[in-house]
Amino acid sequence: MERYSNKVQKIVYGGDYNPEQWPEEIWEEDMHLLKEANVDILTLNVFSWAALQPSEEEYNFSKLDKIMKMVKENGFQVCLATSTGAHPAWMAKKYPDILRTEFNGMKRKFGGRHNSCPNSPTYEKYSVRMAAKIAERYKDYDNIVAWHISNEFGGECYCENCEKAFRVWLKKKYKTIENLNYAWNTAFWGHTFYEWDEIVLPNLLSEHFEQNRSQFQGITVDYKRFNSESILKCYQREYEVLKSITPDIPITTNLMGFYKELDYKMWAKYMDVVSWDNYPSNQDTPAQIAMSHDLMRGVGGGKPFLLMEQTPSATNWQPYNALKRPGVMRLWSYQAVAHGSDSVMFFQMRRTVGACEKLHGAIIDHAGTNETRVFKEVKALGEELKTLGDQTLGSVTEAEAAVYFDWDNWWAIECSAGPSCDLKYKDEIYNYYQALYHLNVPLDIVAPEDDLSKYKLLIAPVLYMTKTGYDEKIRTFVENGGTFVTTFFSGIADEHDLIITGGYPGRLRDILGIWVEECDALPPQAENHFIYQGKQYPARLICDISHSEGAETLSVYEEDFYAQMPVITKNQFGKGHAYYIATRSSEEFYQHFLGNVCKECGIEGLLAPQEGLEVAMRENENGRFLFLLNHTDRMLQTELLEAGRGLLESKEYAAGDMAEIPAKGVQIIKLEKGQGEL
Ligand code: GLA
Ligand code: ZN
C-alpha cells in the first residue's frame, strides 16, 4: 500500500498552530517547546483569511512568510491550510451573498466561522483566488506535506442563491418537470409543479416542521444531496487550483466522522488522503470512537487516513468538558493508529487567550511551560512514535466482515414521518458494530459502490433505502456463499424514497425468504420478547410482523397479537444465507447472535474477547501489527496466539505467552507476515 506522501518517514506528530494570534516574541519560545514535545508537523494558516486579505484588492502575506520561514528553519513539516474556513468581516459587509440563511429562514450577519454560503459567487471568487495565491507563494517549500483546504466544511444554507442553484441541480438530475413530479410523488397534497421556479427549498418556511421532520421526504433528501454536493464543489474548486500549481502535494480537508450533513463517501473520492477530527463526547464508548475511525477508513476505500485533530486534554464546546485522564490521550492516539491512521495530530499547539477556545486544551497551556501533565504526556508519546519509525505506515486492515453504511439512507430514515421518532440509523449501525468489536472481529464499513467479493459477512442494519441494483449486488454476494444480515424497516424504498410496492422488504424478499406485512413501533418503555437458543431477549423500538416464504424461523415473538410470528429468520439462498432480525434487541443478543453467525461463516476474532480490551490489526510489507488497547483502569492480560515482538517495550513473545497491558495502556505486537505472504 502506498503512503500518502513520500516526505514522511514516521507517524507525523503535531497539529494546529496559530502563531498569528501571538506576539512574535512568543514564536521562538514555541519553536523550542514544540521541538521538546517531539512535534514534527504544524498545521498553519487555518483561520487567516482576514489577515491575508485586509481588503478587496489588498493582500498581505508578510506574517505568513515569516511563519513559514521560521517553521522550516526549525525543521518542522507543514500541513498548509488555505484559510477559507471563515471569511473576513469586510467581505460580509460588502457582499452579503456570502452570508448563509438558516433552516428557519434567518439571514445571518457576520460572525462565527464555517459560515460562507456554498453557492455565493463572492465566496467562489475569493476562496479560489486565495488558494491560488497561497499555492503560488509557498509552492517551493519542500516541507509542505499536505494541503488542508478550508476547515471542517459543513452546515447548510437556505438562501436565494442556494434556491436558484437547487433548481439548476434538479433540472440536471430530472431533465423534465414530469420526472421530478413522479420522483417526489407530488400528486400527494396537490404539490404538482409546472415551472422549475415554483420549487422552493425545504425548510421551516416550507415543508418542514420540528427539526428534522419533513412532509415531503423526496424533496428533503434531494436537498441534502444538493447541499452536500454544493459544499463539495467549494472544496473541489480549491482542489483544482492547488493541484494545478503543486501536482505532487497531497490534498485533504478535515472531516468529522459520522457527520450527517455531508456524504463523505462522495467527498472522499476527491481527497488524496482522508483526514478527520476526533472529538468524542464524555459519553462515547471506545467502540463508538473505533466505529468513527472505521468509517473514515471506509470512505477512503480502506486506505490509511490522517488523524488531523484531537484535543490533548479538554474540549471547550461540550456542556461538561472533562479532561482526558492520564494515559487516555496516548491510548486514543494509538486507537486511531490501530484503525488506520498514519498521523497523530492535535488541536492545538498553544492555548489562545480570548474567545471561545481560550479554555480548549493545548500542548502549551496558558502557564507557557513544559511543566504541565499534558505537555509531559505529549512529549512522551512523541518519543515513542519516533522509535516506531515508519514500520506501520501504509498498513491496512484485512477484514472478512463488512457493515453497510449509506448517507442517503441516513437522511431518508431520519426525515421519515413514522414509524418511530426514536429510530436513529447510527444507533442501529452501532448495535451490530459493537458486537463485532467485542468479539475482536475486524470489519470494514462499506458503501453501496464498494466491492463485496472479499467479504464473508455483510451486515446492513435498517436498509430502508434499497437503491436500484443494490439488491442485485446482495443477491450475487449471497448466491456465491456470503452471509447477509439485515433488520426491520429494510427494503422499503428506492433511491427517490418512493415505496417499493408488492410487499416489504421489496427487492430483498426473495433473498430473505420472507414477507413483512406490518411494522409496529413500541413506545420507549415497552418491550416484547423472544427466545434465541434458550435465552430470552427483549424486542424494542420496532417489531416487524412477517411471514416466512421459505426462510427458517429461528425465534418468534412471545407476546401481543403477533406472538408466535418470526423475529429471526434464516434463508438459504444459493450457496449462502440471509438473516432477518425483525426487531431491535440488547447488546447481549447482538453478541450472542453475531458470535454464532461469525462461527458459521468461518470468521474468527483476532484474540479471545475480554471486557475493556480492544484488539485491532494492521498489516503491510513489514509484517502484521497487533494492537492491544486497555480501556479499563486495571491491568489486563491476554494470551497471544502467535509469536511476536512487543514494539513499545522491546520484548519477544512466544505463541501462548501472556501479554500484559497496563491500565489505560497499549501494546503493539509485531507478528510475522500473513501466511499468504510467506
Ligand atoms: C474543530 C476545529 C478546530 C477547533 C476544534 C476545537 O475540530 O477544526 O479549529 O475549533 O474543533 O475542538
Ligand atoms: Zn446559500
Image: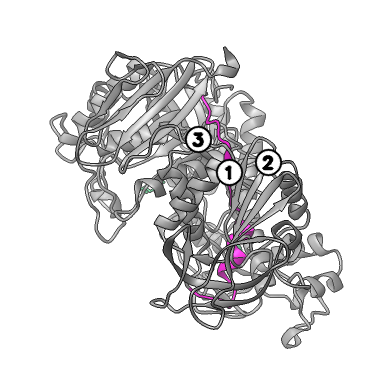
Closer-to-camera residue (635/143): 635
> Magenta part of the protein: which range?
395-421
419 falls in the magenta region: yes
Q: Residue at x 75, y 50 (%)?
A: 475
Label 1 SS: strand
* Residue 169 place in picture, x, y as percent: 74, 61
519 or 174: nearer the viewer:
519
State if disc 1 and disc 2 touch (CB < 8 Å): yes
Where 419 sits versus 610, above or below? below
Give the residue number, with chain letter if any, for mark 3.
604
Residue that label 1 marks: 402
Q: Say which amino acid is labelled 2.
A: Leu
Q: Position of residue 568 (x, y in %)?
A: 57, 62
Q: Mark 2 against mark 3, which lies toward the viewer?
A: 3
Q: Quadrant of the C terminus?
A: top right
Mark 2 to mark 1: distance in Å? 8 Å
- Between the residue at mark 2 and the residue at mark 3, the CA separation in whole angstroms equals 19 Å
Q: Residues within 10 Å of mark 2 (few under 14, many from 20)?
A: many
Q: Quadrant of residue 671?
A: top left
Marks 3 and 1, the one that precedes in the sequence: 1
User: Which residue in the protein does label 2 denote?
Assistant: 452
> Which color scheme did the rendering employ for the protein?
one colour
Of the two numbered discs 2 and 1 on the same chain, state the one appearing first in sequence.
Answer: 1
Secondary element at tag 3: loop
Camera-side residue of 298 and 546:
546
| Residue 516, above or below 40 | below
